[in-house]
C-alpha cells in the first residue's frame, strides 16, 4: 500500500507520497485506472506533490544565491534546484553558467578560478544593487540552509566518478540524503548515485526521449520531459505514466495558462522561476472543485 501523508500547503490539504517526489514504490502502487481518472484541473493540481524553485526563486532574487534559496523557502516551494560546479581547486559551488560573466562581476570560466577567487566576487548586483553582498554559495552552504526546511535538487553540471563521490560526501556531511534529489544526466551517473546515496531520490534529466526506459530501468523515480518534446511526440507522456514513474514538467512564470497546459500531462512535479506564483496558482486551481473535466 502507498504510504501517504497530509500536507497543509497554503491552506490546501494535499496528499503526499513520501518526501515530495513520489517514490517509485508509491507510483507503482497507484492503480492505472485511478490515475487515468484524474481528469479535472482541480484533481490534477492536487496531484502535484513537488513545486521546485528553479535556481531558487530566481524571478525576484539573483539566481543560485542563498537569497534565492531563502526566498523559495518563504514562498512555499517544496524544493529548490541548484546547479553544482567545480572550481579550479575542485570545490563544489553553485552557479548555472560555465562562466562567471553573466551573474557575477568576474570573467572567465568558473573552472579556471579558485574558490577563494570566486568568493570575492559580487553575485547579486547584476540583478539589483541591493543584493551586492550576495556571493556564489558553496554546496555546503546550500545544504545547511535548506536542511529541514526544503528539499534540494542538485543539477549536476560536471561528470565523472570523482565529482559524484565528492557530491555524495558533501550531502552526507552537511545535508539530508532523504531530502535530496539528484538530477542525473546519464545512466551511469544514475547507477552510481543509486549505489553511493541510495536514500536520495532521482530526477532523470534525460538527454533525449529515446532514453526514458533506460533511465527508469536504473530506478530513477521521476522523468523530466521538455514541453517541446511533448509537443513533437504526444505519446511520450503516456509512456512515462505507463512506466509508473513520476513526471516533471518545466515552467517559468507560474501563470495560469502555463500551469493549465502543464497539468494536462498529469505531472507529479512542476518548476518555476517564480515558485511563489506557482504555489498560488496551484492553490487557486485546486480549490475550484471538480466540475469541469479535461479530455482523455
Image: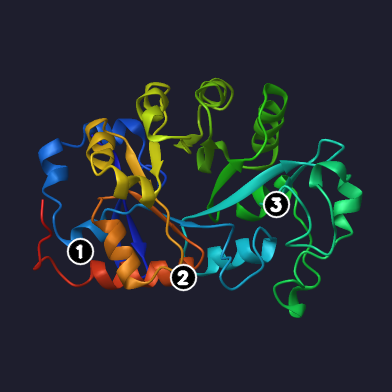
Query: Separation of disc 1 and disc 3 at Cα?
Result: 36 Å
Q: Which residue is mark 3?
A: 95
* 1 and 3 marks in contact (CB < 8 Å): no
Give the answer, above or below, for where 81 lies relative to 164: below
Along the viewing direction, whichever of 113 and 13 lies nearer the viewer = 113
Q: Name which quarter of the figure residue 176 lies in.
A: top right
Q: Picture coordinates of residue 105 (x, y %)?
A: 83, 64
Query: Separation of disc 3 and disc 2 at Cα?
Result: 22 Å
Q: Mark 3 or mark 2: name the one nearer the start of the chain.
A: 3
Q: Is residue 270 left or right of residue 79?
A: left
* Secondary structure at numbered mark 1: helix
**Residue at (85%, 59%) from the top-left corner?**
106
> Residue lying furthest front in this view?
232
Q: Is residue 116 visible?
A: yes
Q: Mark 2 or mark 1: name the one nearer the start of the chain.
A: 1
**Residue at (75%, 69%) from the top-left corner?**
124
Q: Is residue 37 left or right of residue 117?
A: left
Amino acid at each position: 500500500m502507498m504510504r501517504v501523508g497530509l500536507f497543509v500547503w497554503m491552506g490546501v490539504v494535499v496528499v503526499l507520497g513520501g518526501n515530495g517526489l513520489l517514490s517509485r514504490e508509491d507510483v507503482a502502487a497507484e492503480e492505472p485506472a485511478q490515475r487515468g481518472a484524474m481528469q479535472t484541473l482541480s484533481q490534477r493540481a492536487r496531484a502535484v506533490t513537488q513545486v521546485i524553485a528553479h535556481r531558487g526563486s530566481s524571478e525576484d532574487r539573483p539566481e543560485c544565491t542563498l537569497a534565492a534559496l531563502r526566498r523559495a523557502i518563504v514562498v512555499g516551494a517544496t524544493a529548490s534546484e541548484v546547479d553544482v560546479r567545480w572550481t579550479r581547486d575542485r570545490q563544489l559551488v553553485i552557479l548555472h553558467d560555465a562562466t562567471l560573466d553573466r551573474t557575477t562581476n568576474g570573467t572567465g570560466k568558473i573552472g579556471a578560478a579558485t574558490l577563494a577567487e570566486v568568493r570575492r566576487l559580487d553575485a547579486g548586483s547584476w540583478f539589483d544593487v541591493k543584493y551586492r553582498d550576495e556571493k556564489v554559495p558553496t554546496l555546503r552552504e546550500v545544504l545547511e540552509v535548506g536542511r529541514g526546511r526544503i528539499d534540494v535538487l542538485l543539477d549536476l553540471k560536471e561528470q565523472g566518478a570523482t565529482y559524484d563521490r565528492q557530491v555524495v560526501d558533501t550531502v552526507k556531511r552537511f545535508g539530508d540524503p532523504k531530502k535530496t534529489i539528484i538530477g542525473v544526466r546519464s545512466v551511469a551517473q544514475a547507477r552510481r548515485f543509486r549505489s553511493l546515496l541510495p536514500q536520495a531520490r532521482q530526477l532523470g534529466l534525460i538527454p533525449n526521449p529515446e532514453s526514458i526506459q533506460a533511465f527508469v530501468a536504473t530506478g530513477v523515480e521521476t522523468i523530466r520531459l521538455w514541453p517541446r518534446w511533448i509537443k513533437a511526440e504526444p505519446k511520450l507522456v503516456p509512456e512515462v505514466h505507463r512506466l509508473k514513474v513520476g513526471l516533471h514538467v518545466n515552467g517559468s512564470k507560474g501563470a495560469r495558462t502555463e500551469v493549465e497546459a502543464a497539468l494536462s500531462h498529469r505531472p507529479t512535479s512542476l518548476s518555476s522561476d517564480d515558485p511563489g506564483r506557482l504555489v498560488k496558482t496551484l492553490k487557486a486551481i485546486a480549490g475550484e472543485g471538480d466540475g469541469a473535466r479535461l479530455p482523455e
